[in-house]
Image (spheres, rainbow, N blue to C red):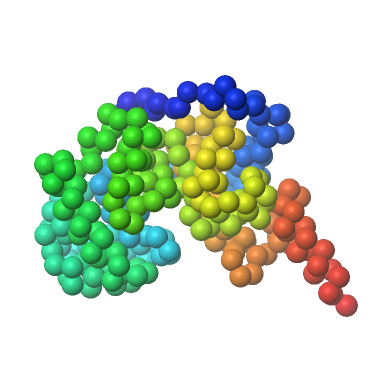
Amino acid sequence: MPPDHLPEPDPNHRPLTPEQADKLPHIHRLLLGYYGQPKPREPWDPLTQFIYSLLSSRTKTPASQQVMRDLERIFHAGPNNWEPVRDASIADIERAIAIVTFPEQKAPRLKQALEQITARVGSLTLDFLAKYRTEKIRSWLEQFEGVGPQVSAAIVNFSTLRRRALSIDANHLRVIQRLCTVPRADAATTETRLMRLVPETWDAAMLDEHHALIQLHAQTLCTFADPRCENCPLLKICPTGQRNQAELHLTTP
């Protein structure tokens, strides 16, 4: 695997204070102590991860994983053989991915993307991306409809490309905003700000583990509608959770 190339340090960017430098490691330690070590990922090739990430947006993980199995079964496709999906009709693809959110949007996007990759590369593969810098890979991926910073980060971090990036989906963004880790912003800006806090010793696999812990926390305790702040391992460092608990005590007779 080629070494990841990081941007040159910004001479105008101030060094982190010790407190800032320990923000993400502290969150990581607390979540790791509460949930235990996440199961290590077995990375897919970049194209398979591209397909999964494109289809899984706003879709729960079990449904997203089932859709990948359905695509393989229905079209006799899979890693190194996604041509049958590319060559299928939009209607057939939409039926195959019906359990994801917005299948009527994702089916034509997927078919078009696979056709465009083939036209640009000469074959249906993204393995060639491994020889490029991370920033160039992400810029290239984000040319495709439906691929924004969250999806491109997932592809470069979760796949065998294994580059440093944080995929800031709705779950990750919610936890970070409630913790007030960085100023509130959109997902792309939040990733940029968080990456400035990432220790230099954290490689791609460590960033993947960190994201997995945040995801698990968002789905288990820090849920959208009914966060269980009283049981949260991050309560002592979470202004939102502390405020929720204070309000609860005020309203409890």
* Quadrant assignment, res 67: bottom left
**53 vs 140: above or below:** below
**What is the x, y in percent for residue 91?**
18, 72
**What is the x, y in percent for residue 116?**
18, 50
Specify whether residue 72 is in view: no
**What is the x, y in percent for residue 9?**
52, 23
**Which residue: 30% across, 30% down?**
132
* Quadrant assignment, res 182: top right
Side of 164 relative to 138 (left or right):
right
**Which residue: 37% across, 34% down?**
134
Between 3 and 38, which is closer to the camera in this rendering? 3
Q: Residue furthest bottom?
A: 253
Specify whether residue 15 is in view: yes
**What is the x, y in percent for residue 175?**
60, 54
Between 36 and 121, which is closer to the camera in this rendering? 121
Q: Quadrant of the N terminus?
A: top left
**Which residue: 57% across, 30% down?**
199
Side of 188 relative to 130 (left or right):
right
Q: Quadrant of the C terminus?
A: bottom right
- Total numbered labels placed on residues in the image: 0
Side of 162 relative to 36 (left or right):
left
Q: Residue furthest front?
A: 12
**Which residue: 32% across, 26% down?**
2
Q: Residue furthest right?
A: 253
